[in-house]
Structure formats: structure tokens, C-alpha cells
Image (cartoon, grey):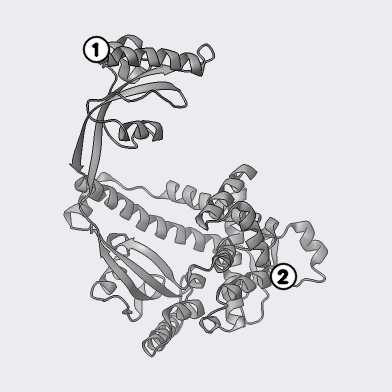
Amino acid sequence: MNKPLVLAALALFLALPVAQAQMMMQSESLDGIVAVVDEDVILRSELDRAVDAITAQYARSPQQLPPRAELERQVLDRLILMRLQVERADSTGIKLADAEVDQTISQIANQNRLSVGQLRQAVMQQGLSWEAFRKNVHDETIVQRLRQRVVQSRVQVSDTEIDLMLKNGGVSSVEVHLGHIFVGVPDGATSEQIQAAQAKAEDVSRQIAEGLDFTAAAIRYSDAQNALDGGNLGWRSVTELPQAFADATASLSPGQTTGAVRGPNGFHILKLLDRRSGAQRLVTEYHARHILIKKSELTSSEQARTKIEELRRRALSGEDFAELAREHSEDAPTSNIGGDMGWFTLTGYGTAVAEALEVTGDGQISEAFETEIGWHFLQRLATRTEDRTEQAERDQARQTLGARKAEEEYESFLRQLRSEAYIDVRLPGARGVG
């Protein structure tokens, strides 16, 4: 993978810089305004940087990009929507500390197999300042938190809904990788607007059938938020898809494309990139018991370790483990039941316990190990393999129903957000006042 191109795509995905008000006032005479969003503005220089990032991303396949004017319109729409979301997050008290931004940047670097210093150099080589990149990361993370808050407040999935979905065979282990093109119609659209959108979608579908690359078509024509990513929806369970999508792609083979599919907000064109099936969910569980000596202001780590090592020696010499736990363990939930932790998955009690379990056989006593709360040792009693397919299906049903509702609710939230805002687009050929 070409890392500079990945970073160029990342720079665009993270929404491009938000200029400070003072900077904007100083530069307005030299830097034109392409949009007014409530009491804020988007500058020509911001739009140019965003478009340049897209152009760099597709440097090896520029034919996939639409004409410059159309690309500017799509990018400006994204910038406006990002600006509105950041403003709403700020007004509702969603904040992000500098340390959290640093942590996210470190994760981005790791995902691209770079150090933070190398990431910084790569970003600057793409023509984006490090300060602007940090601002992009900050804004995108803020928007993710806004989405979580909106979804959590609006989306609930009941056990009854899950039962009904399972009863109707609504959970499938099949997953599909889809491409998506969306031609939208405005709320309260007239019959003429609907006909125009349908005609556009059918024309795009015809061009794809005649050989136009699907990714290029998405970039050129799609109104979806992922248009500039080529319409890639990634892997999704069939049951997570809107029913119309699932029905339209059910008979497709990988590589095939649907015609224009009518949806509540417009028309969709879907391409099946790949399909795969899930497997039975088998889970290894462990039964163990443990003894804990806590660290505190009165008991240092070394003192806790010394005591736990002595208790471990006594257990190894044959003293009853359960009695030792009842008399000496400082873990309140388990001490009265002989230190019994019950059955749990490998990571059910955290990384340190998992590491001890992996190197300890059934019936054996582990080495002493330290966690944040103190020093422990455990005895692994038994292991078993459980079929968790039924529980996995319920979890999948809950996730699927939640994802469907979340998508619908947040799209509704974004439409409301935009309809309530004052938006004056001053880009030639683009939409006017919102």
C-alpha cells in the first residue's frame, strides 16, 4: 500500500482544517469565502486544500475523478456538514483533551506502521501542516462522539425485537462487501425532482453497464458521505443491511451491479464486491480460582508480593487452596467461596489473568503475578469448549437492529441539523442558501 496516498486519504476523511475566526477576518480580503455556515465561514483556501488532498489520493488514476467544479461541490458539502457537526458538538459540551488527540494520532501512526515522527513528516509532505492535521483529528473524533451521543439517546433495541427477528429468520451469518452510489432527493421533493433523480440514477447505472468504473462513478455522481471514498461500504452482515439492499443483492455474483433501487430518500446503485459465510461460534472457557493480596498505602507492592509468594508455597505444599483463599484472600467477591472465579473466557478477567492461564495447565498453580490492584496466583481447574452460536446470534441481532436504527436516526439528525442552519454557498454552480 502506498503510505503517502493512505495519509492523503486520511487527511481528507478527517475533514480538513477549520480556520480560527481571527485568522479568517485577517485573510478575507485575500482569501475568498466559498460558504457561510451560521456565524462561521469556509474559505477558498480550505476548499483548495481539501480538493488537492483528493487529487493527490487519486494521482495514479485521475480519470476516476469528476471535473474540478463537481469535485469542489462534493468536497464543500462535506466541509459544511463537518462544520455543522463540530458546532453542535461544541454547543452541547462535547470536549476533547489534547492528550486524547495525541493518543488518537499515535493509533493512526501505528495503523500505518509509522512512528508519530514519520507520520508528521508524511503529512507535511502532502502539503498539510501538522497543526491542521491535529485539528482534523480533533474534529473527526468530536464528531464520532456526537454521533455516539445522538445514537445512544435515540436508539433502543428490546428483547422482543430480537426474539421477533430471530423467529423470522432475520439473522444470517453471511456477510457481503458492497460498493454504493446514492442519488438523493430533498425532503418534500416534488414529482419532477424525484423523476430527475431517478433519471440520473438510471443514467449512472447505464454508464456502469457500459464500462464506467464503479469507484469512478461513485466519486463523480454519488451524494453519499462516502462518495469520495469510492462508495466503499466495507464488510457488513446481510442482516445489517436495509431490506431493500439485501433483496437487491441476494442474487448477485461478486462483481455484478444492481440497477437503480428506490429508497425512502433517493435512489441507490449497489455493487457486490464479495460474499462470505460465517462459522459456528465455539468459545474456550476456563474455570479457575485465585488468591489476591492487595497493594495499598499500608502494604507496598513488595510486601504484597512476599505475602502472596508465601501463600503460593503453602498451596504447592498441599494445603487446601479453598481454605487459604477464605482465610487470606482480599478479593471480596470470591474469598468466601474459596477463591472460585467461575467459568469465563480467556480475557474475561483481563490481560494478566489471561497470560497466567495460558502457561498454566489444568490442575496446576500459576506463578505469582501483579495487576493494578495487587499480587495474585491462581489454580486453573478445567477448560471446556462451548457452542455460543445462539448467544452470538442474539448479539448479532441486537447489533444489527441497533446499527439499522443508528444509521436512520443519525441521517435524520444530519438532515435536521442542515435544515436548521443558515448556509450560504457562494461557490459558482453550487447550491445556494440552505
Q: Which mark is residue 420?
A: none
Residue 119 sits above or below residue 9 on the image: above
For label 2, count other residues whose C-alpha is less than 10 Å away and answer few (under 14), some (14-19) or many (20+). Answer: some
Residue 300 in view, yes or no:
yes
Locate the C terminus by quadrant. Answer: bottom right
- Which SS class for mark 2? helix
User: Percent x, y for residue 431?
Assistant: 60, 76
Q: Viewer-proximal residue, 323 or 335?
A: 323
User: Percent x, y for residue 23?
Assistant: 78, 60
Residue 162 sits above or below residue 216 on the image: above
Q: Viewer-proximal residue, 351 or 48?
A: 351
| Residue of label 1 | 320
Residue type at the position of mark 2: Ser
User: Percent x, y for residue 226?
Assistant: 48, 68
Q: Residue at x 26, y 45 (%)?
A: 159
Describe residue 384's horizontal placement relative to residue 52 as left or right. Answer: left
Residue type at the position of mark 1: Asp
- Which SS class for mark 1? loop
User: Percent x, y for residue 56?
Assistant: 60, 74
